[in-house]
Amino acid sequence: MSEIIDKLVKTIRSRKGSDVKLSYTSFLLSKGNNHCLNKLKEEVTELENAIKNKKNTVHETADVIYHLLVTLESAGINFDDIMKELKKRESTSGFEEKRNR
């Protein structure tokens, strides 16, 4: 499953600087981090509504994941670092992880 995410991350990276008329990803990235953050918030609201209405949840979840990855790229955050952090947490209780912050 992470192969799909890895491929999407690479695609997003590769679209940075591409023609904004040909690539929605490039268009989003060209607008800057604030625009990407606002779009992510919009998508999270749509997911919230989808969950409440039990309608289009899978579609809206995919949108949130995509826009999260675009926003991370826009902010210059390396997705591999996030995966490393998640790996570190594998054998740690969520309660314990919160206490250690």
Image: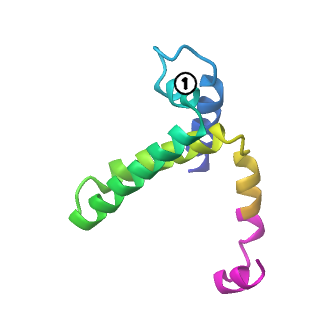
Q: Position of residue 84 (x, y in %)?
A: 77, 58
Span colored in magenta? 86-101
Front in this rendered view, residue 68 or 38: 38
Q: Position of residue 63 (x, y in %)?
A: 41, 45
Q: Quadrant of residue 52?
A: bottom left
Question: Is 42 in front, or is 99?
Answer: 42
Percent x, y of residue 6: 63, 41
In the rendered view, tell whether residue 89 sits above or below residue 54: below
Q: Residue furthest front?
A: 34
In this rendering, would 23 be left or right of 81? left
Which structural element holds mark 1? helix
User: What residue is at 51 percent from the left and 17 percent from the top?
Assistant: 20
**From the viewer's perspective, is 58 left or right of 53?**
right
Q: Quadrant of the C terminus?
A: bottom right
Quadrant position of residue 98? bottom right
Q: Is 80 on the left-hand or right-hand side of 40?
A: right
Which residue is disc 1 drawn over?
26
Q: What residue type is labelled 1?
A: Ser
Q: Residue at x 53, y 46 (%)?
A: 37
Which color mode does the image show? rainbow
Is 22 included in the stretch rendered in magenta?
Answer: no
Q: Residue at x 44, y 52 (%)?
A: 41
Instruction: Write the residue at 65% across / 33% down.
Output: 10
Does the stretch in magenta take in 89?
yes
Number of marks: 1
Graded by Cα atoms within 10 Å as few (under 14), some (14 to 19) or many (20 or more), the crowding at tag 1 reads many
| Place of residue 83 in the rendered image (x, y in percent of width and height, measured from the top left) | 71, 55
Taking 60 as reference, is 30 above or below it? above
